């Protein structure tokens, strides 16, 4: 691969429209989750995950919160259980 050190230049209007749509989509999904079942046992974890994703749209978080790491570990563990049929749920 050639090391070209290319930079992609975008007009501000295009970039900020892209950011606006990403944030709007995350907010809509979070609201739909709330309207489905706000008393769900994992609603707090999901809210934390949505908050982390919204922050990631605007800047690169310097620190990943523990609930994001725990959620990722649980999802990975769940996928492994289904793939290998270990501890079927």
Image (cartoon, grey):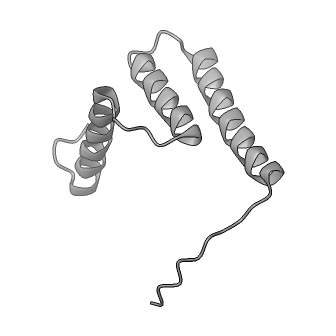
The quarter in which the N terminus is drawn is bottom left
Figure quadrant of residue 34: top right
Tell which of 18 and 40 is nearer to you: 18
- Most distant residue in the left direction: 86
The quarter in which the C terminus is drawn is top left
User: Which residue is depicted at the point 68% across and 29% down?
Assistant: 28
Q: Would residue 80 appear left or right of 61 to someone viewing this image?
A: left
- Most distant residue in the bottom direction: 2
Tell which of 65 and 49 is nearer to you: 65
User: Which residue is depicted at the point 56% across and 33% down?
Assistant: 54
> How many dots with numbers?
0
Where's residue 83, x and y in %? 27, 56
Identify whether 15 is placed above or below 69.
below
- Most distant residue in the right direction: 13
Figure quadrant of residue 84: bottom left
Identify whether 17 is placed above or below 26.
below
Tell which of 85 and 46 is nearer to you: 46
Q: Would residue 49 appear left or right of 38 to someone viewing this image?
A: left
Where's residue 5, x and y in %? 53, 78
Where's residue 36, x and y in %? 60, 19
User: Which residue is depicted at the point 74% across and 41% down?
Assistant: 21
Identify whether 3 is placed above or below 70.
below
Where's residue 72, x and y in %? 32, 40
User: Which residue is depicted at the point 64% across and 21% down?
Assistant: 31
Tell which of 68 and 74 is nearer to you: 68
Figure quadrant of residue 74: top left
Q: Would residue 75 appear left or right of 18 to someone viewing this image?
A: left
């Amino acid at each position: 691969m050639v090391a070209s050190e290319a930079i992609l230049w975008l007009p501000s209007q295009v970039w900020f429209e892209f950011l606006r749509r990403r944030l709007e989509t995350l907010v809509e999904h979070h609201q739909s989750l709330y309207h489905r079942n706000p008393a769900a046992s994992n609603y707090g974890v999901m809210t934390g995950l949505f908050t982390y994703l919204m922050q990631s749209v605007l800047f690169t978080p310097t620190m990943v919160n523990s609930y994001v790491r725990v959620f990722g570990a649980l999802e990975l563990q769940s996928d492994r259980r289904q793939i290998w049929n270990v501890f079927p749920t």
